[in-house]
Image (cartoon, rainbow, N blue to C red):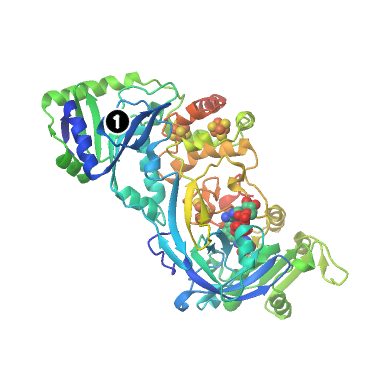
Amino acid sequence: MSLKIINKSDLMPFVANMMGEYEVIGPVANDIGFKFATLTDASQVRLNYNTTVIPPRKTLLPTQETLFSFQKDMLAPTFDMKWRVLLGVHTCDLHAMCMLDEAFARGQPDTHYMKRRATTTIVSMECLDTCDENSFCKSMNTLTATSGFDLHLIQLGDFYAVDVGTTAGEALLANHAKSHEATRAEIALLDKTMSQKWSKFPVRLHLDGKDLPALMGVSYKSPLWEEVGKRCFGCGSCNIVCPTCYCFDVRDEVSMDGKSGERYRIWDSCQLDEFARIGSGENFRKTHAHRLRHRFMRKGKYIAEAFPGHQGCVGCGRCARACLVDITPVGVWNSLRQDHA
Amino acid sequence: MSIPAIESIYLPTLAWISKVETMTATEKFYTVELPRGQSLGHKPGQFVQISLNGIGEAPISISSSPSRSNGKFEMCVRKVGDVTTALHNLGEGAQIGVRGPYGRGFPVEQFEGRDILVAAGGLSLAPVRSVINQIFDHRKKYDRFIILYGAKNPGELLFKEEREEWKKRSDVEFLETVDKGTPEWTGNVGVITTLFPKITVNPRNTVAITEGPPIMYRFVLMELLGKGIPEDQIWVSLERRMKCGVGKCGHCQLDHFYCCQHGPSFNYAEIKGVMEAL
Ligand SMILES: Cc1cc2nc3c(=O)[nH]c(=O)nc-3n(C[C@H](O)[C@H](O)[C@H](O)COP(=O)(O)OP(=O)(O)OC[C@H]3O[C@@H](n4cnc5c(N)ncnc54)[C@H](O)[C@@H]3O)c2cc1C
Ligand code: SF4
Ligand code: SF4
Ligand code: FES
C-alpha cells in the first residue's frame, strides 16, 4: 500500500490517541533492559529498545490463559476480547508471529488464539542497527519484513516513514495520527537509509537459514548432541524466551469449595524431563541430548517443513542470551556446518 | 466430526457413563452415551479426550467399532494417574466430558479384499478391537482374518466373552498367549512372537495391524517383515503424551509428525526412518 510520514513530534500524540481506544502494548524500560508491557502513559514507550527478554508473543499466547470455566455441570468458554495495539515489534518477532498465526490456524483453528489475533493490530518497526552480538537475523532473512504488519515504522532522522500493510492499519493511522503522503525527498531518504542498513548487520551463521533443514537432516546422529547435552541443565529458559516456541500444558484449577474452577493452558518446555513421558512411564526423549536435539530440529527443520514459507528460528538471539552455559543456535549450527563442510 | 466444538475447541461435550464393567485389576470398560443420541462418527483407531472438570483430560482410544456405534461408544481405561483413577471411581450415570474423535485411524476401506493380520499386546486389544469388530461386521469384504493376542498373564487378558466367541468362529484364526502362565492356564505360554511360527500367511496379500507396548513393536515388526509382508502393508499405532489432541500443544511430537494429527495410526513405511518412532 502507500507510504506515509509521521513527524517525530507527532508520534507521542499518536500513541496517546491510540491509548484512548485500545490497550497499547509496547517496549518499556525495566531493571534488566526492556519488556513489552501495557502502556499507562505514552511517554513510557521506548521505540529505540534493542531487544526484550520475553518476546511479544505473550500478547497472542499469554503465559497462562483460561480456556473455560466450570460450575458444577455448566461449562463456559472464556475468551479475551480486548482490542489491542502491539507497538514496536521488531521484524524478527514479526516473522515469528506470522509462523504462530499459521500454526494456530492450521487444521482445527485454535479459537482462543484466533480471537486474540483478530483483536490485535500490529505496528512493527524496522531495525537500523544490530541489537547485540547474539542476534543473527541477517542469516535468517528476518531483518526486514514487507508483510505481516498492519503498520510498519522506519525511523528516518526526525520523522518516521510508515508502511501501511492492511486496511486496519490504514484506519488506525487515519483515525489516530497526523500523517502525510511521503514526498519524493522523504522517499529518497528512506532509500538511502535502507541501502546503508544491511552492511551494519554482521553475518554470524556460516550458512543461510534456508539451508538449515538440509543441514539438520544430516545431523540427527551427530556427536554434538551428547556434547551440548552434557552442559545443558534442562532449565527450559531457551524455550521461555523464544518467539517461535508455542508448546503448552493444559491444567485444571478448582476453587476451595470444589464447586467451580477452570481449565487453563500454560507455557511448557520441551527441555523438561516429563514433556514426552507417557502413562506406562516410557519417556521418548530421556536425556538432555535427546531433548536439545529435538529443540534444534524443531527450530531448524520441522517447523520450516511443516509450515512452508516460515521458519522455526528467526535469529533473535534471545535463547543465546538466556542460556547460562552458552548453548547457542549460532554455535550449534556453525559446528554442525563445519562437520559437514 | 459430529461433536460440535461450541466456540472453544477445548470445550468438551457432556456425556454419560451408561455402563461400567471391571475387566482386570487395573482396567475398567465403559460405555459412554452421547447427548441426543448422536454418533461419535469415528474411524477405527481414533481416540477421544476424556475430560473431568477440575482434574483434567486424558486421551483414550475408542474401543467400539464405527459399525456398532449408535449414540454410544466404548473405551477401556487403565488406572495410572489422576484422570484415570478419578474415572475408575465413577459409576453408571456419572457425567464426563468428551472431545473428538481425533487423529488418523486405520484406513480399513483400503484393506478390502486383503488378508488381515492383527497382532495386539496387553491393553492395546482395546483400541484394536475397533478394527476387529469393524472387520467382523463387514467380514465378506475381507479375505483371511488372523488375530494374535498376548498379555503378561491370564489375569490381564481383556474381553473374555468376545475372545471365547472368536475361538468358536470359523471365519477367524485366533491365537492367544501369556508371557507367564498360572496353574489353571492351559493355553500357549510365551511372548507374542512365539505365535508367529504357528501361522502361515500370503505376505503379498496381507495387511498387518499391530499395536502394543513400545517394547513389543520392535519384535513384532521383525516377525512381520521376516514373513515378507511389504512395509507399506504394515500399520502401527503409537502412543505419545498428548494434551490438546488438535496439533497445537507440541507434546505428542515425534520428529516432524504430530502423533495426534498424523497418527496415532501410522503406516510403517512412513515412519521407519523416523528416529524417535520405534
Ligand atoms: C492416542 C492415545 C490413546 C490412548 N488410549 C488409551 C486407552 O484406550 N486406555 C487407557 O487406559 N489409556 C490410554 N492412553 C493412555 C492414557 O492417555 C494415559 O494413561 C492418561 O493420559 C494418563 O492420565 P492420568 O491423568 O490418569 O495420569 P497422570 O496423573 O497425568 O500421570 C500418570 C502418568 O501418565 C503420564 N501421562 C500424563 N498425561 C498423559 C497423556 N496425556 N498422554 C500419555 N501419558 C500421559 C504421565 O507422564 C505419568 O507418567 C492413550 C494415550 C494416547 C496418547
Ligand atoms: S537455556 Fe541452556 S541450559 Fe537451559 S535448557 Fe536451554 S540449552 Fe539447556
Ligand atoms: S531459537 Fe533462539 S534465536 Fe531462534 S528464534 Fe528462538 S530464541 Fe530466537
Ligand atoms: S496432543 Fe497437542 S499437539 Fe498433539
Please provide percent x and percent y for residue A144.
Answer: 31, 31
Residue B173 vs residue A196: left or right? right
Q: Horizontally, is A13 left or right of A305 in the view?
A: left
Task: Report the amino acid beneath label 1.
Answer: Gln
Q: Secondary structure at mark 1?
A: helix
Numbered marks: total: 1
Q: Position of residue B12 (x, y in %)?
A: 47, 64
User: How dense is the environment of label 1, judged by Cα within 10 Å: few (below 14), some, or many (20 and up)?
Assistant: some
Q: Chain of mark 1?
A: A
Along the line of sight, the residue nearer the viewer: A227 or B217: A227
Outermost residue toward the right in this view: B183
Residue furthest to the front in view is A257
Q: A199 or B11, which is in the foreground?
A: B11
Where does ligand 3 appear, by image quarter?
top left
For the point 57% across and 56% down, the residue is B266
Please name the residue that numbered disc 1 is placed on.
Answer: A44
Q: Position of residue B11 (x, y in %)?
A: 44, 62
Q: Nearer the viewer, residue A265 or A212?
A: A265
Residue A78 x/y as whole percent: 39, 57
Residue under the image location 52 percent in, 27 percent down: A337
Classify A131 as above or below B203.
above
Q: Quadrant of residue A28?
A: top left
Q: Quadrant of the N terminus of chain A?
A: top left
Compared with residue A221, is residue A200 higher up or lower down, i.e. above or below?
Answer: above
Viewer-closest of A5 and B46:
A5
